Amino acid sequence: MGKSKTTKFKRPQFNAVGLPANAVKEEDAEEEDHGEDSCPAAELLEKLQSPSADVREFACASISRVVQQSQTIPGFLQRDAVRRLGPMLLDKSLAVRETAAGALRNLSACGGQEACEDMVKHDVMTPLTALLRESCAGFESAAVAMKDQKNAVEDVANEAVNLLWNLCESSSQSLSVFNKAGLMDLVVQCLERHPHNVELAISAAHCLHTVTEDNPELLCSLNAAVLGVVESVLLTSQPDMAHTLLRTLAAGTLWNMKGSLPAARQAQTLNAVVATLSQCLDLDTGTLIPELRQAEEVRHRNTPAAAGEEDQAAGELAVAEMNEEEEEAPKRNRNGKAARVDNDFSDLLPRDKEELKEATALLTAQQTSLEIIVNMCCSDDPSDDEWEEESSSDESDMGPDGLCDGVSNLMSPLCLSAEVHEALINHSIPEKVLKRTEFPRKEAMDVCQQIPSWKGLIKKIQRVQSRALTCLHSILSTMDAESLGGATALQAAAQHLSTLVFGAAEIPKDEEFLEAVISAMRSLLQMIASKNISQCMTPPQLMSLSEAATRCDVVSVRVNAVAILGITGSTLAKEKGTAETLQMIGNALLQVATKDANLVVNGEALDALFDVFADGDEAETACKHIQLLPALKALQPVFKAKIRKEGRGKYSPQQLCVLDNIKVNLRRFIGYLEKVVKK
């Protein structure tokens, strides 16, 4: 069996810095007054040339806000917004630098690949690099001058690092500049500010976590000083959620750097990384989120009424607007693969939203921890856009023309090093991941539902659950049953997953959740079947799962649901009195094999049919009742023609290899059934 690799998730950031509430309303009113023929881009870009720093700052801040509406972005790009904003990064005014970096940051995040490519084309990396160098050089002097006040130089650096992060995630050319221009040292300097400015340090840690992934050019040049700084962050002990997130990102960065660590320190560092992830997953969001909300209420009660109400109202409005913008949009990362967008705007929340920032940091830390564990369990084999599970009933068969040469590694079991396996088990990671797969506690969800500014946390809470399910799938794919607690623990886990899917009146429709839970369920049922442990899904549950999956647009959900029918059916075929249930499973699989529009799903359904009806008296009885042989004979030429017609244009070589293998097995299986019928 194969596995699917977790996609890296990114988020656009939203920055209204420097734009007061009344200015926002005026700008919105202006946009309404201008028609489609009068885009706000022209006027705002013109203001960038003003001799007044205040006007330039206002223009940058306004652009930063307007580009959050994705429909406005083409108007800005067509008017050379990037070329005009680039020089603003080195403006004489720090406020202009900050708002210009914020505008480019939002443009890169909300404009996707096109905007990032435009920035690379207009060489935004050159002024951005210069800005970072100047900012880092001015950290200490600015800190002395500002003392307890807001440090403007660090605020500029924070925007610059976020822009750099976005560009390096989306553009291989930006990443190459990062490697060659020595930007690693600058970002590490920002990370070192963590005792004074955890917000800047978190932005730097996010950036490092991104640029150190799959970047051998950078990793081969790492020095001991860089490793030392990241390790020192990992060893911080502040209990707040911001530092929890900072340590989690440092753990992910060290995992990415593992090949550059001195051999003598690898085991110790691995243990520290897993311990950090374990501590993060120990935190109970169901308890902490209501506590944080209660702390916010207490603080508001103790704030002077006039100032508090005005600030709170402005903060609620800003957060509500950002929540409205938090819909996911397709983007491409630097490898050209589709990536979902995670919208994390926690560093841009109003300054009176400390508790909400803490809650957001907690959820981001847990999501990141789970994604790091998935990466620990996964090799770099087929990506998500390839065949979800490289499987067939006879994997040793070669297709014609040697099509399957070199694909055996896709079908081999995943490897988990003994050291990683031991660390995950020693820190009870499987149990903690399973705990995070539970539905969120009602108290936490109620808090988020009732407070407008907290509503954005609902999606984040649900995403942590989905990531935990994906993580569970990876753990099940790489560990043996005994390591996971044996038959009793596996049955309990299966019962838990069944409750997640079937506990409500109807199966959940959320695609992200459904994709994750069915993937985990498939891995678990496969392990249970291989150990001859009794299954817990009833025939009605199987059928309702099949029906729900058939209606889902996500291919992997349909593939995994079909595989679950096959796993369960092949187990039932060995038991007495199961012919009726096997008929239901067989009919469901035939429906998918003949009617699903996707060849991958058709192939998985046929593969499942081969497994279910391969042997046994019950299978033979069911096979005759559903007329499986004539149905497959009718399907065979259609399936072959569909591969010939659609295969080369729509599917990867790996997928075509497996499909060709299934085509061969279909011919053989029909021959087998003909012998069964003659008995």
Image (cartoon, grey):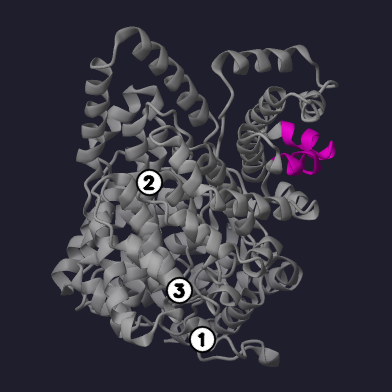
Q: Position of residue 257 (x, y in %)?
A: 45, 73
Quarter where residue 506 is shown? top left
Q: Main secondary structure of the magenta part?
A: helix
Residue on which the image places disc 3? 257
Q: Position of residue 377 (x, y in %)?
A: 38, 73
Give the residue type at disc 3: Met
Give the residue type at disc 2: His
Q: Secondary structure at mark 1?
A: helix
Q: Position of residue 7 (x, y in %)?
A: 51, 60
Residue pictured at 74% horizontal, 23% vertical: 52
Between disc 3 and disc 1, whose residue precedes? 3
**Region of the chain picked out in magenta, as a range:** 72-88
Q: Is residue 482 visible?
A: yes
Image quarter hosting the C terminus: bottom left
Q: Residue 626 lies in magenta, yes or no? A: no
User: Label 3, label 1: how many angstroms apart (C-alpha)?
Assistant: 25 Å
Q: Disc 3 vs disc 1: which is toward the camera?
A: 3
Residues at badges 2 and 3 in contact (C-beta under 8 Å)? no
Q: Is residue 54 left or right of residue 243?
A: right
Q: Position of residue 40 (x, y in %)?
A: 77, 23
User: Label 2, label 3: how many angstroms apart (C-alpha)?
Assistant: 26 Å
Residue on which the image places disc 1? 409
Q: Few, some or many C-alpha atoms within 10 Å of disc 1 (few <14, some 14-19, many ≥20)?
A: few
State the mark number for residue 196.
2
Q: Residue 84 lies in magenta, yes or no? A: yes
